[in-house]
Each structure stands twice: as C-alpha cells, then as structure tokens.
C-alpha cells in the first residue's frame, strides 16, 4: 500500500490505513520475535575486538611495582597518565578506579551529601532541600543517583548546542540548594548532541549561589565517533580554572564501551585539590582498585592514538547499524507526514526518536507485545516522566544487522499505528 501523508487523509482513509497496519503488525506478532533495542550494549563482534588484552601475563609496572599487590589507591602511574592524555588534564588530576564510572559518580554525590567538598560550607545533607539540574532527554541512571539522595530534579531543555544556558544561569544564580548539573558533553545520551564552545564557557564562568556547585562532566562517549567529523568540546577544567572555579568540574570516563562493559576501567579527573580530598575520603573504603586490569588496558590501548585506532574498528561495526535504522525511519515514516522526527548523531550509542505527543508509551507497548524491547518511554526524563510522552531512546548497537532490519521495520509500523490511532481519536 502506497504511503501518504496522514494529515491529509480523511477519517475513512485513516481507518483503511489502520486496518492495513494492524495486519502488518499481526504478521510481526506471528513471528514470535525476541529482539532488544533497549540499553546501549556492545554486540559480540565489538567485545571480540579486545580479546588480545586477556592474554597478558606480565604485571610488572614500568617502575617495578607489582600490579597484583595492594597499594596505589590513586591508580597506577601509567594508568593515570593514560587517562590524563585522554581527558586533557595532568596526571596528578586523575584517579583511576574500578570498572564503573557510574560507581564513581555515585560515590562523589554521596561524598557531597555526607561530607561535603573542599569548597563546601557544610555537607549537603544539612540543607532543608536539595536540587540538581537535569538536561533532558538525558541518562536515566544519572537521574536515579540524585533522586536516590533526595534531590529535587529540575529538567533543563536540551538543544543541539547543549542545555538551555539562559535557564541554567538564571536558576543557579539565586538558589544555593542547587548543587550541580549532569552533563554528557560529547554525543549526549540519548540525542547525540555535542556541547558548543559557548555552552562550555558559560558553564565554566557562570556565577552560582552555591559555592560548591558541581558540574558532573560524563565523557562516556568522548572517543565514540561514527563519522569522519570528530566532535570535541573545550576543556572544562581548563576553563573553570581560568574563571577561578577550579573545584567546579568533576570529570568522568571509562573504557566500558571501548573494551568490556563489565570489566573496563573508569577514571575521575578534577582539580588537584579535589583529587587529594577525594583520595583522603576514599581511604577508609578501599585499599586499591583492580590494578591488574588497569595495566592490561594501558598495555593493550597504549595511548590516546591507540584508543582512536581501536575505536575505528568499533565504528566499522556500528556505523552501518545506525544508518540502517535512520534509513528505515526515513523510508517508512517521512512519507506519512510529521508523525515523527529523530536525531542524526555523529557518535555515541543512541538515536532519539520523537513520535507524536501522547504516543511514546503506546509505541513501546506495541513493540513489547510483538517481541521488541525498547527502553521504557519516559526513561530519559527525571522520575521517568516525559511530560509530552513523545520520546523514545533507540539503541541500535546490540542486535545483529539481520535482527535490526526486522526490529526497525516493526518499530516503524508501531509508530505509524500509534499515530493513526491518535488521529482517529484514540480508537484501536
């Protein structure tokens, strides 16, 4: 059946389209599918890229230290140097941790709440209320951390240049209970946007009522490029130092989607004053992180150039998957009129799909009933509530190409069916 603009159809034509879509949908249901486009998981082919790292047997560091033993809470010197180059900071401004950058983020929010930072007047828990800024759509696990500690989550609209800085500056200037902002500056989760130089500078120089305001700068996708156009942001720590806000940024990254998601290495960068304070507060918790894994990663990836070369292999696997999904959207949704739009990321792990307001939950429900799992509608917003019920986070990375072809076609049928239902007044 030839597709037409739904908004130019009369009720009879829409009803005919609905009947055809229901037949198409029933055909997918009969296939008994079990497909997953939910979380941004690397596929098996990507995981296999790092197999050589597991054959390492020599755990003697450059200075003779045995990485199998206790000690060096701050991380191995070569690992600190590795992440310092990746993040554009000095070695003394880095702590190399375990396998999870999210765990480090949790620990530092906990530290601010329990103990406070070097620039805190008092621990955050002694405030009558606490607030945190959340660019939306954003990363659900970020939001969950601050929600867990009782913060009121304030949504900040995102644009291709980053969060709405007029709104951010206005809020932080007058309210000392706003303690920070979550940021994924390069290939944001899930839109795939890159913060502009102006946005980064405004974050660095803005005046905040809270002297200990923190920018949680999650560089999760700093080297995860999908095109020849390399997206980079100005160095947030350098700019914050320039504007006398050296203690403001807390910078994170990990190798989770470079090597192994469950067995990578995470790192934290901050001012040297912050680093020394954080290490002091870590000492009662742990003697040291997994230094054997740190050394394996350094020997395998070597340096920033080595990482970029390794990521070209990831790109060769992922770029066709992203293109397949975008092509399916363009061919199956665009002819139907303005029933959906989507982002065109140049890196990262996700595509944001925006459907008709009030339809995202319905699309996710239809997909689930036909055997396709998506991230829950609303998950990219604080408290899991998308006021417009329009956003879906699409992760093309894990399925095979053949699975992705089926999943994309099913998804477009569900989007069209939900749109037709809405135009018919909710009749199903």
Image: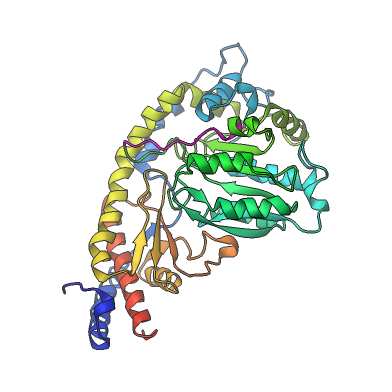
* Residue under the point 52% across and 45% down: 184
Quarter that holds the C terminus: bottom left
Can the viewer see residue 34? no
State the image coordinates of residue 292 (x, y, percent, origin top left).
57, 26
Residue 411 is covered by the magenta coloring: no
Question: In this view of the protein, which residue sits in the foreground, 187 or 110?
Answer: 187
State left or right for residue 147 relative to residue 115: left
Question: In this view of the protein, which residue sits in the foreground, 361 or 398?
Answer: 361
Q: Residue 61 lies in what quarter of the image?
A: top right
Q: With respect to residue 206, does 59 lie above or below?
A: above
Can the viewer see residue 190? yes
* Residue under the point 27% across and 52% down: 324
Q: With respect to residue 2, does 312 lie above or below?
A: above
Most extreme residue toward the bottom is 12
Residue 230 is covered by the magenta coloring: yes
State left or right for residue 413 relative to residue 98: left
How many numbered marks does the figure carry? 0
State the image coordinates of residue 345 (x, y, percent, origin top left).
37, 48
State the image coordinates of residue 264 (x, y, percent, origin top left).
52, 35
State left or right for residue 234 relative to residue 325: right
Quarter that holds the N terminus: bottom left
* Way the structure is coloured: rainbow
Question: In this view of the protein, which residue sits in the foreground, 174 or 43?
Answer: 174
* Residue under the point 51% across and 17% down: 58
State the image coordinates of residue 187 (x, y, percent, origin top left).
44, 44
Q: Residue 245 lies in what quarter of the image?
A: top right
The main secondary structure of the magenta stretch is loop
Q: Tell me where the magenta segment starts and ends, as one range.
A: 228-237
């Amino acid at each position: 059946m030839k597709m037409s603009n739904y908004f130019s159809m009369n009720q009879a034509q829409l009803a005919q389209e609905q009947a055809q879509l229901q037949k198409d949908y029933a055909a997918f249901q009969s296939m008994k599918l079990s497909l997953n486009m939910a979380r941004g998981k690397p596929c098996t082919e990507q995981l296999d890229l790092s197999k050589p790292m597991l054959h390492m047997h020599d755990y003697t560091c450059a200075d003779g230290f045995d990485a199998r033993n206790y000690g060096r809470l701050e991380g191995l010197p070569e690992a600190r140097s590795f992440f310092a180059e990746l993040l554009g900071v000095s070695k003394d401004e880095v702590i190399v941790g375990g396998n999870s950058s999210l765990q480090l983020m949790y620990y530092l929010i906990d530290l601010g709440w329990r103990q406070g930072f070097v620039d805190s007047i008092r621990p955050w828990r002694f405030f009558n209320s606490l607030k945190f800024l959340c660019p939306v759509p954003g990363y659900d696990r970020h939001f969950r951390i601050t929600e867990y500690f009782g913060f009121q989550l304030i949504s900040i609209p995102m644009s291709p240049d980053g969060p709405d800085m007029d709104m951010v500056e206005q809020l932080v200037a007058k309210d000392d209970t706003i303690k920070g902002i979550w940021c994924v500056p390069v290939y944001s989760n899930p839109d795939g946007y890159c913060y502009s130089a102006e946005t980064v500078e405004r974050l660095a120089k803005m005046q905040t009522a809270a002297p200990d305001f923190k920018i949680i700068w999650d560089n999760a996708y700093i080297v995860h490029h999908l095109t020849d156009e390399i997206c980079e942001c100005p160095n947030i720590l350098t700019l914050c130092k320039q504007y006398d806000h050296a203690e403001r940024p807390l910078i994170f990254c990990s190798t989770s989607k470079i090597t192994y998601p469950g067995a990578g290495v995470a790192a934290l960068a901050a001012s040297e004053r912050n680093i020394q304070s954080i290490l002091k507060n870590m000492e009662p918790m742990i003697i040291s992180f997994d230094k054997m894994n740190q050394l394996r990663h350094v020997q395998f990836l070597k340096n920033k150039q080595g990482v970029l070369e390794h990521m070209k292999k990831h790109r060769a696997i992922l770029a066709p998957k992203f293109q397949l999904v975008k092509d399916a959207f363009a061919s199956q949704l665009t002819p139907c009129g303005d029933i959906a739009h989507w982002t065109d990321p140049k890196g990262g792990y996700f595509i944001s799909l925006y459907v008709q307001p009030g339809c995202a939950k319905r699309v996710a429900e239809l997909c689930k009933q036909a055997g396709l799992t998506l991230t829950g509608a609303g998950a990219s917003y604080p408290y899991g509530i998308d006021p417009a019920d329009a956003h879906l986070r699409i992760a093309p990375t894990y399925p095979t190409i053949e699975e992705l072809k089926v999943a994309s076609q099913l998804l477009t049928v569900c989007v069209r069916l939900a749109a037709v239902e809405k135009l018919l007044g909710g009749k199903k």
